[in-house]
Image (spheres, rainbow, N blue to C red):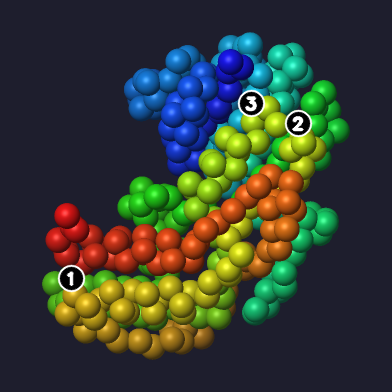
Amino acid sequence: MNAVAVTGASGLIGTALRGVLAARGVPVRALVRSRERACAVGDTETVVVGCVSDPRAVSEACADSGAIVHLARSTHRIEDICRFDYPAMYAVLAAANTNAAELHFPSSQAVFGNADGYPPPVLDDGTPPNPCTAYGAMKAAFEWTAKATCRIPPVVYRLPVVVPARLSDGAPWLRHLLAGGFCHLDVARRTVNLMPLDERFQHGGLSFVHVEDVVATIAANLFREPARGTVAMLADPEYLTFRELADVYADAARCLGYTVRTMWAVPGGGPCTVERMFRFDTTTATARLGFTSEAGRARLFGKLTDWFAAAAGAPHPP
């Protein structure tokens, strides 16, 4: 069976993908950036420690692989993007062509830039990229370069906010987006104050996808010729407002005996200074990649409720 090389194998998507591939008996070659992260992927057949911008480390990790899933990235800071992500573009594409491997590249909604208002427009996969950040520009450049240079047409998965199986496993920015930006919990006083920190939270919302659905789609399309050359958005069909998420926390808090106070207005009228998210039509992902997000809204609400119960000190369910 052909091996699959995974860069960023110890991250959110990488960890979930390794589990799916292992269950299917697919050999995995993992690239991680530190020995500590190598310990986290110790059950993987081959583990290479090195930076994704190092062609030698990437070449070793991808050797004899039939497919490469490029998940590794640095930060949103332009200096890190220039130091790590752009050199990684050369290293990963060279490894794909050297091994005649198909490339699977999770990109980002950031290639579309910033929505201009609420509610945001609905974009489909025919919408041209229009990035407004260094991170979005890097993702768009990788898409374009991969399509132009890969011997085997790559598969590009554009991702919105990726929700982990447990919110507690998410990065700090994700917990802020899904809770901290508008849900303020005081365990000592057993109160919850629902108040948006800025205009984005007051009026906006988010497009999302569950990590389970992302890795299921990637795994299903490895070594699948009809998927090659596809660029598609993987997103749940429902766009959720932050006010809807706040209502989830309000219901959970009342069930736990908390006092809920809601003031859905920005303190001092502070403006929004961050990107606002679009909504997405995922027809292409469904038709060409078999992407599905069954009961995505209900699953997200369940994850938020579980996280809140744990944070509020409620006993875990049996």
Q: Earlier in the sequence, mark 3 or mark 1?
A: 3
Establish if 221 lies above or below 54.
below
Residue labelled with disc 2: 225
Report crowding for label 3: few under 14, some 14 to 19, many 20 or more residues within 10 A (C-alpha): many
Helix, strand or loop under label 2: helix
Res 73 seen here:
yes
Is residue 290 or residue 14 the one in the foreground?
A: 290
Along the horizontal axis of the image, is 36 left or right of 109?
Answer: left
Instruction: Say whether marks 2 and 3 touch (CB < 8 Å).
Output: no
What residue is rendered at 23% in x and 60% in y?
Answer: 310
x and y, in percent, of residue 255 in the image: 22, 77
Name the quadrant containing residue 238.
bottom right
Which residue does the numbered mark 1 point to in the structure image? 187
| Element under disc 3 | strand
Q: Amino acid at mark 3?
A: Ile
Q: Secondary structure at mark 1?
A: loop
Q: Residue at x 36, y 48 (%)?
A: 169
Label 3: which residue?
68
* Occupied quadrant, residue 38: top left
Residue 101 or residue 275, whichever sits in front = 101
Percent position (x, y) of residue 151? 82, 23
Q: Which dot, 2 or 1, sits closer to the camera? A: 2
Task: Say whether residue 146 is visible.
Answer: no
Question: From the image, which quarter does the C terminus lie in?
Answer: bottom left
Residue depicted at 74% across the width and 64% down the height: 123
Residue 36: image x %, image y %? 35, 25
For the residues labelled 2 and 1, the Cα–Cα distance comes to 53 Å
Closer to the observer: label 3 or label 1?
3
